[in-house]
Image (tube, rainbow, N blue to C red):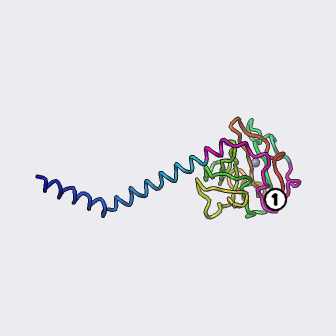
Amino acid sequence: MKKILFLSSAILFTMLLTSTRWAAISDATHRWAGGTLSYLKMAQLYAREPDQKLVMPVHTIRVEQVRDSWHAPRDGERLHEGQDIFAKRGTPVYSATEGYVVRVGETNLGGQTVSVLGAGGRVYYYAHLDSYAPDVAVGEYVTTETVLGYVGTTGNAKNTPPHLHFGVYTPAGAVNPLPLLTNRS
Ligand SMILES: [Zn+2]
């Protein structure tokens, strides 16, 4: 009886070691550890004071060139909850802050968009992108040196000159990004 038990557990052990399942289990554990780590980092970021200065996200554009479009009336009863920063199609869009990419995806209004979670739980929203930076992905840590994508006309900007729609959302709602923006250099 003992011998059978020993044999069967040996077989089971060998099967576990050699099966492809093992790779899947170890991969899942690895992903779980990575996920937990980024949750911790995000919690730390959340606890920090929000950035009082944002770095101009659009390459080569100066803050003085931005025509204030905060709360400009839009279709329906909507007010414009951000700033439109005009630039040539394909101009690189950098993150305005340090943070973590929390969303990469398409919406009707925003077209191709990237959202970055920054200090104080603020979310920075980059919309109408022509394309994404090749390695931009949810969970990626970004700095003001990270390119997120390129200026375009996707979403409801398809009949406008190329621009970045830049939004800043605090846990209490949208705030005007313009007073916070500083020049890149
Ligand atoms: Zn806009």
Q: Is residue 135 left or right of 145 when viewed as pictured?
A: left
Vertically, is 22 above or below 73? below
Which quadrant of the structure image shows residue 173? top right
Q: Is residue 53 toward the left or the right of residue 125 in the image?
A: right
Would you call the spot at circle 1 few (<14 residues within 10 Å), some (14-19), or many (20 or more)? some
Indicate whether 100 appears above or below 133: above
In the current view of this chain or complex, which residue is farthest to the right?
Answer: 64
Residue found 63% across the figure and 49% down from its top: 107
Looking at the image, the residue that sits furthest to the left is 1
Residue stretch rendered in magenta on the structure: 42-67
Residue underneath mark 1: 184
In the image, residue 154 lies in the stretch drawn in magenta:
no
Q: Position of residue 73 (x, y in %)?
A: 80, 40
Q: Give the residue type at disc 1.
A: Arg
In this orientation, which residue lies closer to the viewer: 19 or 77? 19
Is residue 44 rendered magenta in the image? yes
Percent position (x, y) of residue 172?
70, 35
Residue at (66, 56) in percent of width and height: 142
Task: Look at 57% across and 50% down and name the residue there.
Answer: 38
Secondary element under disc 1, as helix, strand or loop, is loop
Q: Decide if ligand 1 comes within 8 Å of the CB at mark 1.
A: no
- Quarter of the image that includes the C terminus: bottom right
Residue furthest front as drawn: 2
Q: How many marks?
A: 1
Q: Nearer the viewer, residue 24 or 40?
A: 40
Residue 181 locus on image (x, y percent): 82, 50
Q: Residue 120, image x and y in percent?
A: 69, 42
Residue shown at 81%/59% (left/top)? 184
